[in-house]
Image (spheres, coloured by chain):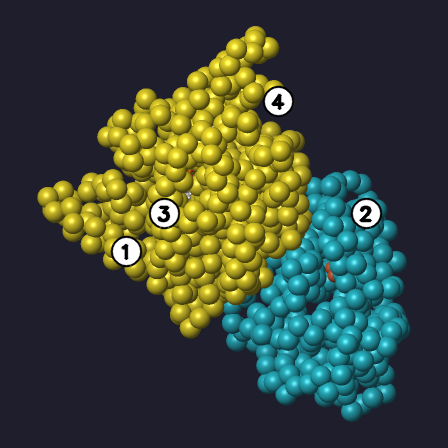
């Protein structure tokens, strides 16, 4: 690991830099990732008058989630009017739940509109982030050995950006074609093919209805069924867009209404309440009205409380499963083999192509790459038993570092971008403080962080996520470092307040 | 058998899987089935395969009811494993020329009634009821029938298949008896008596009405095939012995009930039981097939083909 490189990054005269290392002049703010979070951060900083920004992006294009997830049927499952930034509303959304390409288009539009191109360094994969206490600088080392540094740093590398084939037995032996949902192979011709989809989560239920139209035969392997709710999706008529364009406040009103509607869902999804029962009834009704066969309904009935895992929404998933060229298999898979998949009922199911809709590698206990704080401490060690932060955004011992989508910031019921906006504004205030007061360190006090987390964990214990199902929200030991136990409004309120006394301030 | 560690068991189950494709169904040996054996063996295999399938459905119900995630997963595997046994037995039948292309053999009427009952009510039965009945069925029917089959059939492929099936079965029983003991553990007598409340549930009574004649019918069938009745009874005794090896196991009133029933079933002299139940077998034999509702769709998943 490129250890001492960081010390030379400020452009001091020490010549002992290895040949290939390129070091850059420190920026005010260093951002890792050019998805919604990283770009939103840059916009808000810019609006606050901070322009000395560097965004490191490992890909060659912006967009993160929406650049990577281009599988057939990919779309958001929060209405677009809410799944967008309030400071950059788009009157032209074509439908209530826009497709992936349209969302990516919106992100490109943000880049253009706010002139963010100048900040972004493409093809820079950050492998390590290290803090130099002497200089009060964060430096990021890329795979190519380049070093970028900044007075402050923002982790915006995405909660669901690392996708790879799952570690299933026999996966190496399989000779057919493999596709991961988050790295779609647009060149593959599905016509006349026998195809399997492994997984029945958020991505799978969007892929399946589209694939079934194309392939000769589709087999869906399900491990645990999810709650599937009806999806109120429709096209936005042209006159409606026109109104949004001419009278932007009408769109804000709609956004606010959608926001409140989603807030009310927290009552059903986050905590067990009479509304939870009602929501479950709606889910069961949806299943009943779309699936006639009793056994199939049984296979598709979740055995956990609604909200414990991500609630799915779809109108065409159940019908797709019942198409004559589709088959649902609920037998456990025990291995992949040369020609396909062997499941425990003893049958080898053979396929031309297997689609893995198996989700992402989520770092709940540990950081996606080494992050080194004060005194050489490693975030991986600090988080080994579950990630913790103060208000999801700062971690004691890692001064001047801001997390987007940090520990316990996940929404179960509302747009991630609503939460994101609160984080961005909080980070702006922290960063302004660092720059404005010329601080070397702005570090949250350990006991403040501890107290905050005790409160969070106490509140989490009462939520549906901690009600006994297994989900990617929880660590192996059942610790929930992912979700925020409350309304988005509560979260926004806590983020509105930046209390100096929560922090240790070290002047530069 | 001591109480087993269920987490380790789950790992073991996952690590010891097999598929129909692991067996060469066309290997020589099929000719070892004698002409005289053939028709009776066919009936026997049909029953056996359906019992496996009924067991499968039972485990599916257990999976829904399981008190822990580990058990839920174990039962999901067992559900599929029983299906595999039925599939493998169909493959044997295919090998022995007992199946037409696309044919799914008809279950006998008593099995048919049990299937109907399982489809309607199994998911609503309390965990401890299923948790005691299933080991009983496994040990009595599966156990006795399989050993018998291996004693009468010389075809090596049959032996190869049953070696695998029996390995699975030993794990089913290990878990089954452990769970029966867990249910007798740390409970007061009153709590235990309360677990008997479902006895009054008409749904369970319906189940019993289907289950008793099935046992007698199976007894008749296997005897017809030449299985000494004692074999079946020995298996019942084994259930009593293993289930009752610990105080916890014996405290489980469902165990007590079912093992008593086993004892009665074994005792042909108990006319009080056998006259009406045998009559029920006869009576059910007269139910016209077309009176029965369509078979549930889970039944149609069976296949002898190793690859799909
Ligand atoms: C299929 C799918 C559907 C979704 N639908 C919704 C929805 O409907 N509503 C909702 O609220 N949320 C949804 N989400 C969650 C979604 O991830 C977030 O809403 C949001 O897009 C995350 O933005 P981000 O910028 O934090 O991360 P990303 O969009 O993942 O962007 C992170 C960026 O960082 C880059 N990066 C990562 N690691 C490094 C590194 N080491 N060095 C340099 N660059 C790096 C990546 O290449 C990427 O461009 C969905 C997610 C998926 C996968
Ligand atoms: Fe079996
Ligand atoms: Fe069994």
Nearer the camera: disc 3 or disc 1? 3
Q: Is residue B188 left or right of residue A353?
A: right
Q: Looking at the picture, how far across and down is residue A56, in whole percent?
A: 43, 26
Nearer the camera: disc 2 or disc 3? 3
The mark nearer the N terminus, 1 or 4, is: 4
Task: Provide the secondary structure element on which disc 2 rests.
Answer: helix
Which quadrant of the rendered structure holds the N terminus of chain A? Answer: top right
Q: Is residue B106 visible?
A: no
Q: Is residue A272 above or below residue B94?
A: below
Name the chain under label 1.
Answer: A
The mark nearer the N terminus, 3 or 4, is: 4
Q: Looking at the picture, how far across and down is residue B289, in whole percent?
A: 56, 72
Q: CA distance from mark 2 to mark 3?
A: 65 Å
Q: Which residue is mark 4?
A: A3
The mark nearer the N terminus, 3 or 1, is: 1
Q: Which residue is mark 3?
A: A422
Q: CA distance from mark 3 to mark 1?
A: 18 Å
Name the chain under label 2.
Answer: B
Kindly indicate which chain is depicted in yellow in the rendered structure: A
Q: Which residue is mark 1?
A: A258
Q: Looking at the picture, how far across and down is residue A139, in whole percent?
A: 51, 25
What crowding class fits label 2: few (fewer than 14 Cα within 10 Å), some (14-19), or many (20 or more)?
few
Q: Colour of chain B?
A: cyan
Q: Nearer the viewer, residue B302 or A397?
A: A397
Q: Are marks 2 and 1 on the same chain?
A: no
Are the two marked residues, 2 and 1, in contact with CB atoms closer than 8 angstroms?
no
Q: What residue appears at the point 34 percent right and 37 percent down from the top-left corner?
A: A40
- Quarter holding residue B252: bottom right
Q: Which residue is mark 2?
A: B160
Name the chain under label 3.
Answer: A
């Amino acid at each position: 690991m490129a250890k001492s490189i960081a010390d030379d990054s400020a452009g001091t005269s020490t010549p002992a830099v290895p040949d290939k290392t390129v070091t850059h002049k420190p920026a005010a703010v260093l951002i890792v990732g050019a998805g919604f979070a990283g770009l939103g951060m840059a916009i808000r900083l810019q609006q606050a008058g901070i322009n000395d920004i560097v965004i490191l992006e490992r890909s060659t294009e912006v967009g993160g989630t929406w650049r990577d997830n281009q599988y057939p049927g990919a779309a958001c499952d929060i209405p677009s009017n809410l799944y967008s930034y309030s400071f950059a509303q788009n009157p032209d959304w074509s439908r209530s739940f826009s497709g992936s390409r349209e969302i990516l288009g919106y992100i490109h539009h943000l880049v253009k509109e706010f002139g963010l191109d100048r900040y972004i360094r493409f093809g820079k994969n950050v492998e390590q982030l290290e803090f130099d206490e002497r200089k009060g600088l964060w430096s990021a080392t890329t795979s190519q050995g380049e070093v970028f540094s900044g007075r402050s740093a923002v982790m915006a590398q995405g909660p669901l950006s690392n996708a790879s084939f799952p570690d299933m037995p026999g996966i190496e032996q399989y000779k057919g074609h493999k596709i991961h949902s988050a790295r779609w192979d647009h060149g593959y011709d599905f016509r006349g093919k026998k195809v399997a989809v492994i997984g029945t989560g958020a991505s799978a239920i969007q892929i399946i209805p589209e694939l079934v139209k194309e392939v000769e035969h589709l087999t869906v392997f399900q491990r645990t069924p999810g709650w599937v709710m009806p999806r109120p999706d429709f096209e936005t008529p042209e006159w409606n867009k026109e109104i949004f364009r001419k009278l932007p406040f009408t769109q804000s009103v709609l956004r606010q209404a959608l926001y409140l509607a989603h807030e009310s869902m927290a009552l059903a999804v986050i905590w067990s309440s009479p509304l939870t029962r009602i929501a479950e009834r709606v889910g069961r009704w949806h299943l009943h009205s779309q699936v006639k066969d009793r056994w199939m309904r049984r296979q598709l009935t979740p055995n956990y409380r609604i909200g414990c895992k991500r609630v799915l929404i779809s109108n065409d998933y159940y019908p797709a499963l019942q198409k004559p060229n589709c088959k649902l298999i609920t037998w456990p898979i025990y291995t992949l083999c040369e020609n396909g998949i062997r499941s425990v009922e003893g049958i080898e199911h053979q396929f031309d192509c297997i689609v893995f809709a198996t989700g992402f590698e989520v770092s709940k206990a540990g950081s996606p790459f080494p992050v080194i704080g004060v005194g050489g401490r490693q975030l991986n060690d600090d988080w080994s038993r579950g990630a913790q932060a103060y208000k999801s955004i700062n971690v004691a011992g890692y001064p001047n570092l801001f997390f987007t989508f940090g520990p316990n910031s996940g929404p179960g019921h509302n747009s991630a971008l609503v939460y994101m906006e609160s984080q961005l504004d909080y980070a702006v205030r922290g960063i302004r403080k660092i720059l404005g007061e010329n601080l070397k360190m702005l570090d949250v006090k350990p006991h403040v962080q501890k107290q905050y987390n005790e409160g969070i964990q106490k509140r989490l214990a009462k939520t549906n996520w901690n009600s006994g199902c297994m989900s990617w929200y929880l660590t192996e030991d059942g610790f929930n470092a992912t979700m925020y136990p409350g309304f988005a409004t509560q979260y926004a309120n806590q983020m509105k307040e930046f209390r100096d006394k929560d922090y240790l301030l070290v002047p530069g | 058998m001591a109480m087993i560690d269920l987490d380790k068991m789950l790992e073991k189950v996952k690590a010891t899987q097999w598929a129909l494709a692991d067996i060469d169904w066309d290997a020589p040996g099929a000719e070892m089935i004698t002409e005289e054996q053939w028709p009776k063996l066919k009936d026997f295999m049909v029953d056996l395969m359906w019992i496996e399938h009924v067991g499968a459905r039972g485990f599916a119900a257990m999976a829904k009811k399981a008190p822990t995630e580990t058990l839920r997963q174990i039962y999901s595997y067992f559900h599929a494993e029983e299906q595999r046994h039925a599939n493998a037995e169909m493959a044997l039948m295919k090998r022995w020329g007992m199946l037409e292309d696309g044919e799914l053999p008809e279950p006998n009427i008593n099995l048919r009634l049990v299937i109907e009952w399982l489809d309607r009510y199994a998911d609503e039965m309390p965990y401890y009821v299923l948790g005691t009945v299933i080991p009983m069925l496994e040990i009595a029917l599966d156990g006795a029938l399989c050993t018998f089959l291996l004693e009468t059939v010389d075809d090596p492929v049959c032996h190869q298949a049953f070696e695998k099936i029996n390995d699975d079965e030993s794990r089913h029983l290990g878990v089954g008896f452990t769970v029966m003991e867990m249910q007798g553990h740390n409970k007061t007598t009153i709590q235990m008596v309360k677990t008997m409340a479902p006895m009054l549930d008409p749904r369970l009574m319906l189940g019993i009405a289907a289950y008793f004649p099935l046992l007698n019918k199976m007894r008749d069938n296997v005897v017809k095939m030449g299985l000494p009745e004692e074999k079946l009874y020995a298996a019942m005794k084994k259930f009593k012995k293993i289930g009752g090896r610990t105080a916890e196991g014996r405290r489980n009133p469902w165990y007590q009930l079912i093992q008593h029933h086993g004892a009665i079933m074994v005792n042909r002299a108990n006319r009080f039981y056998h006259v009406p139940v045998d009559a029920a077998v006869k009576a059910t034999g007269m139910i016209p097939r077309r009176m029965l509702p369509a078979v549930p769709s889970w039944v149609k998943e069976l296949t002898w083909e190793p690859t799909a």
